[in-house]
């Protein structure tokens, strides 16, 4: 009898591979684990080299690389919070990957130090008065509440609050979830669900303010209230792409997640990826259109910096690469269900997420400097390798230490047998 | 004998003296049994059959080897068409039909037109989804031969049905119900066609119809 086909297919697939879900972990001698160790070493060397060799350009390059990987870790945090708040069943099989990504948040607490050291070089409002007058000729001094908000001391205190809150929240959520692996207790899931609701509020406020502080204040007179949402939407695209790539890397060729992560999970990750690609475009265009329509000089200046001096092609590349191409590519169902096509989309989106961050930071950071135009620099690449290597090292270390799926989550069985309609 | 021209495919198995039959209807106890039966029926070569359940049964499309729905293509084409039409309308209105200078911007200020283009695209896509689905499902339709079966009413409640249409080339008044009972159906019946789908040539009647064979009930093998 060939009965029960379909209904028990995922279960059957699991039996075929012979996976014991109680021991799904990354062996320390797995190529990925070794790779992450190597990446950490390379990253540390690259960071020292970039620091030693880089001039003033180091800080803007570093800030770009830092924000790129920080948004991945923050994306992990909000992804996990959302899964708990919505009591999602489908995502349990891939949730731990995002939990590991958010577990790297304390690393970014440490990696913020170079930004502090370069405060006066990165942000014109933090520069010594003489330099600021020279550099910010067209701006003039800050007044009123902006002058109050953008003071170095207050800035550092706020940054410490954001980073400590994120690190603590991410670390605690991950620790509780991993603790559940050893002491199976549905109460843990319940507790994390309850904690995730205020967690999301904390996330929303701090991410908005951090993107105002760290990115928007590069152009201190400019403001856009939607800016935090823009950074958030890019972060979610980033983490979804990263989770897809991690899942594919760990699932293919009978990896530890073989038979656990199925095309059904890829399909849903792909749908969310598609959704957030559209959401990102919606937010980005909303910001652009209102400023374009209002046509007020203090608002349009931000786009002027991105339409001139060689930045225009980059602006077009951001719109096409982050939205137009992935929108049409990810429309189809089969594209989302096959690991090859979905991981191609994920790699593409990660590359353009970096271009997006670069486009947010660089035009404003460089505008007052000697090379205001679009001028790619070897330090951009070196700092990317530096922060990326350290991020990959931390991620690998977290992944080797504990299970790759929440083995005692009450919804794990639901997730393993999950099927799209 | 009585092959109506052109309508052979849709002509129910009319045995001359027996009532026209729309098809066979089998009732199963569980979604699992329905899934199994659907796979086996498809395996046996039937193509014109359907599964009926109070709720979606996972894997049933695979078991029945259903082709992918063409509805997404309606959505894509009408969505893109709606977006294009929205943009074209605004372009025509603001450059040709009624050009107005608005805050000193060019007549064709496309960024201002994007929200309406987007909404028209959504409208087109939604209409494509609704009407594409209705067309593919051949709805609206006020009656279906299966409604003649009183047991079929429980389809919306707690029973799982599989129906095989008589227009399937494999259909046989004896063998088809027998197959369904072998597959574990709790109840099998032949659903009569009260009103033929297409008018059939009036070939009858001379004299009174012969006694009708009782429709096979519950496994007539």
Image (spheres, rainbow, N blue to C red):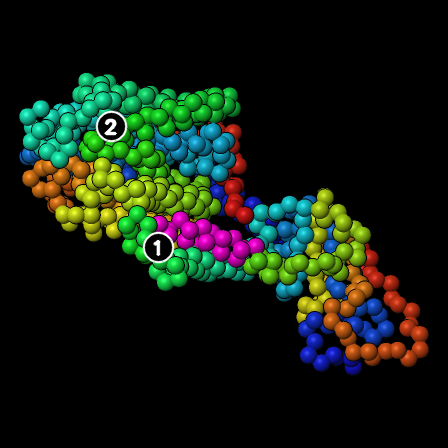
Identify the residue at image location x=39%, y=34%.
A79
Q: In this view, does A372 lie to the left or right of B203?
A: left
Q: Residue B209 carries which label?
A: none
Identify the residue at image location x=88%, y=67%.
B212
Q: Is residue B7 left or right of residue A257?
A: right
Residue B94 visible (yes or no): yes
Work out whether A361 lies above or below B32: above
**Label 1 vs label 2, nearer the camera:** 1
Location of residue B217 by image quarter: bottom right
Identify the residue at image location x=18%, y=43%.
A305
Decide which of A4, A277 is in the foreground and name it: A277
Q: Which mark is residue B100?
A: 1
Residue B76 visible (yes or no): no
Q: Position of residue A100 (x, y in %)?
A: 34, 31
Work out whether B157 lies above or below A184: below
| Predominant SS along the magenta part | helix
Span highlighted in magenta in the image: B110-130
Is residue A407 in the magenta section? no
Query: Tag 1's secondary structure?
Result: loop
- Count of numbered circles in the view: 2
Q: Position of residue A142 (x, y in %)?
A: 18, 26
Is residue B122 in the magenta section? yes
Decide which of B15, A3 is in the foreground and name it: B15
Identify the residue at image location x=68%, y=52%.
B52
Q: How far is mark 1 from mark 2, CA to CA?
A: 41 Å
The residue tagged 2 is A213
Q: Where is residue A150 in the image (x, y as percent from the top left)?
A: 21, 23
Query: Tag 2's secondary structure?
Result: helix
Q: Mark 2 lies on which chain?
A: A
Decide which of A162, B111 is in the foreground and name it: B111
Work out whether A46 lies above or below B75: above
Q: Position of residue B144 (x, y in %)?
A: 73, 59
């Amino acid at each position: 009898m060939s009965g029960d086909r379909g209904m028990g297919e995922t279960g059957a697939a699991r039996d075929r591979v012979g996976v014991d879900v109680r021991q799904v972990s990354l062996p320390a001698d797995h190529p990925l684990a070794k790779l992450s160790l190597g990446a950490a070493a390379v990253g540390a060397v690259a960071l020292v080299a970039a620091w030693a060799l880089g001039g003033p350009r180091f800080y803007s390059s570093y800030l770009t690389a830092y924000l790129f990987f920080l948004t991945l870790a923050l994306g992990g945090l909000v992804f996990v919070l959302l899964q708990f708040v919505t009591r999602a069943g489908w995502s349990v099989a891939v949730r731990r990957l995002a939990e590991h990504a958010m577990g790297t948040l304390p690393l970014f607490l440490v990696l913020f130090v170079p930004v502090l050291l370069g405060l006066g070089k990165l942000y014109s409002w933090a520069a010594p008065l003489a330099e600021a007058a020279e550099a910010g000729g067209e701006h003039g001094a800050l007044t009123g509440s902006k002058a109050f908000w953008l003071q170095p001391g207050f800035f550092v205190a706020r940054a410490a609050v954001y980073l400590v809150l994120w690190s603590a929240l991410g670390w605690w959520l991950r620790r509780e979830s991993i603790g559940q692996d050893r002491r199976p207790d549905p109460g843990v899931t319940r507790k994390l669900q309850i904690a995730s609701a205020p967690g999301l509020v904390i996330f929303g406020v701090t991410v908005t303010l951090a993107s105002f502080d760290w990115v928007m204040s590069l152009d201190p007179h400019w403001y856009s209230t939607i800016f935090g949402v823009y950074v958030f939407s890019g972060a979610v695209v980033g983490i979804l792409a990263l989770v897809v790539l991690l899942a594919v890397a760990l699932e293919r060729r009978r990896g530890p997640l073989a038979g656990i992560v199925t095309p059904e999970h890829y399909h849903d990750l792909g749908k969310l990826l598609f959704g957030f690609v559209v959401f990102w475009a919606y937010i980005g265009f909303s910001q652009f259109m209102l400023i374009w329509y209002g046509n007020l000089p203090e608002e349009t200046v931000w786009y002027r910096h991105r339409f001139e001096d060689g930045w225009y092609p980059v602006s077009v590349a951001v719109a096409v690469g982050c939205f137009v191409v992935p929108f049409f590519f990810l429309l189809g169902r089969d594209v989302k269900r096959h690991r090859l096509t979905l991981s191609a989309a994920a790699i593409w989106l990660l590359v353009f997420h970096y271009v997006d961050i670069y486009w947010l930071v660089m035009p404003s950071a460089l505008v007052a400097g000697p090379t205001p135009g679009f001028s790619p620099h070897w330090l951009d690449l070196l700092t990317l390798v530096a922060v990326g290597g350290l991020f990959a090292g931390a991620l690998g270390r977290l992944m080797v230490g504990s299970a790759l799926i929440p083995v005692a989550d009450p919804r794990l069985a639901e997730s393993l047998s999950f099927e799209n309609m | 004998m009585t092959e109506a021209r052109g309508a052979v495919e849709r002509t129910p198995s009319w045995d001359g003296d027996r009532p026209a039959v729309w098809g066979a209807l089998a009732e199963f106890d569980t979604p699992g049994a329905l899934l199994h039966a659907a796979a086996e029926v498809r395996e046996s070569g039937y193509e014109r059959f359907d599964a009926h359940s109070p709720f979606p049964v996972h894997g049933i499309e695979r078991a029945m080897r259903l082709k992918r729905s063409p509805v997404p293509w309606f959505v894509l084409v009408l969505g893109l068409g709606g977006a294009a039409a929205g943009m074209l309308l605004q372009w025509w209105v603001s450059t040709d039909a009624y050009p107005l200078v608005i805050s000193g911007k060019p007549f064709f200020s496309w960024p201002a037109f994007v929200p309406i283009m987007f909404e028209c695209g959504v409208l087109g896509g939604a209409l494509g989804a609704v009407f594409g689905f209705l067309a593919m499902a051949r709805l609206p339709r006020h009656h279906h031969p299966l409604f003649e079966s009183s047991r079929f009413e429980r389809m919306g409640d707690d029973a799982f049905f599989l129906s095989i249409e008589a227009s399937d080339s494999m259909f046989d008044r004896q063998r088809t119900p027998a197959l369904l009972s072998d597959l574990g159906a709790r109840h099998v019946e032949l659903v009569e066609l009260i009103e033929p789908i297409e008018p059939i040539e009036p070939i009858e009647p001379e004299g009174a119809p012969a006694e009708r064979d009782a429709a096979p009930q519950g496994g007539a093998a």
